[in-house]
Image (cartoon, rainbow, N blue to C red):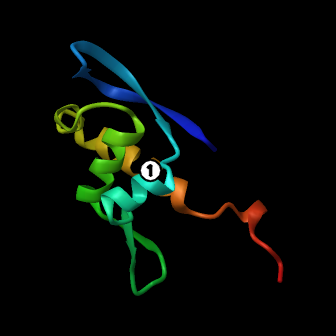
Amino acid sequence: MSTVTHILAEPIQAHGEEVKELTLRRPTVQECRAIKALPYNIGESGYPILDVEVAAKYIAVCATIPASSVNQLALPDLNNVAWLIVGFFMPRDSEQSAA
C-alpha cells in the first residue's frame, strides 16, 4: 500500500483548484522525523488512538496539499483520511513474522 485514494464527500480548494479526491502516499522516514510524532498513540487497550493534529500534518505532506486545504476538509473526510494515514504505520498481517 504505497498510495491510497480517498474520494471526498465535499470538495476542497488546493493550489487554486477544486479537489474532489486525495491521493495519499506513504510518508518517508525523513518526513516522520521532521514531523517528530506519529499520527496515533497506543491506548491502554492496545489499540491506536488518533492524534488529529499530527495526522493533519501528515495529510498535508502525503497528499501534497497546503495545511489551509486540510482545514477545509469535512469532518467525515478528515476522520477517514486521518485513519488512512495511520494505516501506513500499521503492520499488515501478511508481513508479520510467525517467530
Q: Residue furthest right?
A: 98
Q: Position of residue 87 (x, y in %)?
A: 52, 55
| Lateral position of residue 31 relative to residue 51, left or right | right
- The quadrant the C terminus occupies is bottom right
Q: Nearer the viewer, residue 39 or 74?
A: 39
Give the SS element for disc 1.
helix
Q: What residue is drawn where x is 41% and y is 58%?
A: 32
* Count of numbered badges drawn on the protein: 1
Q: Position of residue 67 (x, y in %)?
A: 21, 38
**Is 94 located above or below residue 99 in the figure?**
above
Tag 1: residue type? Ile
Q: Which residue is mark 1?
A: 85
**Is 44 located above or below residue 79 in the figure?**
below
| Lateral position of residue 87 relative to residue 73, left or right | right
Q: What residue is drawn where x is 75% and y is 69%?
A: 96
Q: What residue is drawn where x is 39% and y is 34%?
A: 63
**Is 72 located above or below residue 92 in the figure?**
above
- The quadrant the N terminus occupies is top right
Q: Position of residue 37 (x, y in %)?
A: 34, 66
**Is 34 located above or below residue 78 in the figure?**
below
Q: Nearer the viewer, residue 48 or 36?
A: 36
Q: Residue furthest top?
A: 17
| Lateral position of residue 72 relative to residue 83, left or right | left
Q: Picture quarter containing residue 51?
A: bottom left
Q: What residue is drawn where x is 32% and y is 65%?
A: 36
Mark 1: few/some/many CA within 10 Å (<14, 14-19, 20+) = many
| Lateral position of residue 25 relative to residue 54, left or right | right
Q: Position of residue 56 (x, y in %)?
A: 28, 49
